[in-house]
Amino acid sequence: MSRADDAANDGTDPASTLVRATRVALIGSPNAGKTTLFNRLTGLRGKTGNYPGVTVSRSTGQAVVDGKAVIIEDLPGTYSLAPVSPDEQVVSDLLSGALRGIDPPDATIIVVDATTIERSLLLVSQALAIGLPTMIAVTMIDELADRGGSLDLLRLQSILGVPVVGIVGTKGIGIQAVRDLLVQPQAWPRPVLAPPTDPTERAAWISSVLERVLHQAPANHRWTERIDRVLLHPVMGSLVFFLVMLFFFQVIFTVAAPIQDWIGSIFDGIGSWATENITWAPLAGLISDGLVGGVGTVLQFLPQILLLFLMISFLENVGYMSRAALVMDRAMGTFGLEGRSFVSLLSSYACAVPGIMSTRTIPSSRDRIATILVAPLMTCSARLPVYTLLIASFVPNTVVLGPLRLQGLVLFGLYLLGSVSALIIAGILKKTRLRSDSLPFYMEVPPYRIPGWRLVLTQCWDSSKYFLRKAGTIILGTSMLLWILLNVPSVTAPPEFNEQQAASYQLEHSVAGSIGRAVEPVFKPLGFNWEINIALIASLSAREVFVSTLGQIEAAQSDDESSISEALVSATNPDGSPVYPPGTVAALLVFFVFALQCMSTIAVMRRETNSRRWPLFAFSYMFALAWVGGFFANTIVTAWVG
């Protein structure tokens, strides 16, 4: 077995273990098709890590060509090698050999969008000036032809003095030609005469190249222009974004619900089998209450998570995200931020961790910190199981107007509350502690493209794997620990208690029950009892654990096969009052809008800000908002309901 196979099998970064393996860096501007080429060459087997000494992530993968391993490194997208952000700085430093602990690559592939080649030639000229063996991969050649454009690739190759290959990544066109060249990347020619470095001379060089290779410029994308008249309009564009999000939240309770019920029935069957066939009571309880009631309850919400990631991936690849950023740039400016911050905040809808990491593209350090501090307020996928469970259990699915139903509107309102709160907090931070001058905002707006289904599904699955990984690690571990704490010490219930009452008695007098009662003075004004308190404390590891904890508690106390929603609705206190009256449900929903209950997010905030002060500040102010918001929600709804 080769050293390349060893590295692939043990899960290590091949770039760090294959000393003799050739490293080829992919560079290009955002939306140029760089990642699609990377996936084609590496077979979707890329690994992600960090460059030593910095927080910018690196994606590396292995392409096997003629039995030899070639390491492909997908660098962060950049428009220029004159850096204005941490991502661009890393690209520039890596290529020039100035990045500590990492040697420069053996060769580079510059990915160029054929439809925007004029803008791409600036990056080409800067990369060629470094002098590494280079090839040019010209993407979107099919779209260029469809729009009446004509680009002479052979002439471009002759002028630049390096190999030039036209590709269509989504269709696999030209990929084999790239692989053939990867047999000996070190043999690729270096430019005999590097482009000039003086800005004026470089501009003249770009114009000269274009005159000789671009026989016919592509016509403007007709449908793009028509759609952009609406989507880039300050008012209509904002309205469309509002309607898109509203539509999605309606879909969650219609499309995903039947699949959720099917997954739930599978786990119910596993729990029933364990109860009926495992004779050792502790093991049966561990499986039925700990595993099924904990992890199984969370996994029921995988369809909603998949829908969320699918929507975000599709909107990003179709070209809508950059337009949303441009439309929102003016609104963000009102709160002291800019369009790049909007992109990071929008990414946080999937998960705050990649949203916070994406702030590296923001040039201003104070804008970065402000965005990081409010990113956890955006409603991430981890909140979705909590929201879906509580809304599906306690909010009637009544029709409000046409296709709009109350459950979807409540969910949309929670997302809206988190987003508006994030902007308000950011505005306060930017006018006080993090005041700074605004920097110019630029973003390339690509034409609308129908993304390849493979790319969308791959991105959706990659994001969903993070959710499943948490279910198999953090949530599983927490569920096991909670099952122990809920069953220790073992107490004997009064003889007159029935089985369900005896189970409740055991939980209340367990270690977990004691912890829940100990913090009751803090959460009682919000209407939370000891059961809810346990779930809140457990959810500090990950928000989804709140659902798994309630699932365990209700599974332990239930004497039938009712679903967790039915168990929550019928749950009562010893005095006969409901555990979840309307005020308590409202307080829980609002509490989860604001509270920072995710250790992974706190760890990433610590790493990205290089400080303990900012994560502590974020956790403190968000807990204060959560408590105050929950208190007012409980008070108002309780008074309103009567």
Image (tube, grey):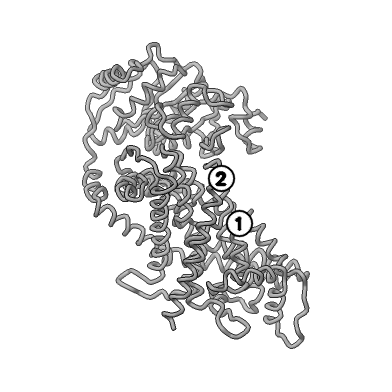
> Which of the marked residues, 1 or 2, is nearer the chain's N terminus?
1
- What amino acid is at disc 1? Ser
Residue neighbourhood size for the residue with mark 2, other residues' Cα within 10 Å, grouped as few (<14), some (14–19), many (≥20): some
Q: Is residue 512 left or right of residue 642?
A: right
Quadrant showing the N terminus: top right
Task: Work out whether residue 148 or residue 591 is closer to the camera in this orientation and state it.
Answer: 591
| Quadrant showing the C terminus | bottom left
Q: State whether residue 425 appears in this view.
A: yes
Residue nearest the viewer, comparing 202 with 72: 202
Q: In 3D space, how far apart are the residues under numbered discs 1 and 2 (Cα atoms)?
A: 16 Å
Question: In the drawing, what numbered circle is on residue 541?
Answer: 1
Q: Is residue 105 visible from the viewing direction of this image?
A: no
| Count of numbered labels shown in the rendering | 2
Query: Residue at coordinates 44% horizontally, 44% vertically from top-left?
Result: 455
Q: Amino acid at mark 2?
A: Arg
Image point 40% across, 11% down: which residue? Answer: 192
Q: Which residue is mark 2?
A: 606
Q: Measured along the vertical axis of the image, is residue 356 above or below residue 105?
A: below
Q: Judging from the image, what secondary structure is the residue with disc 1 in?
A: loop
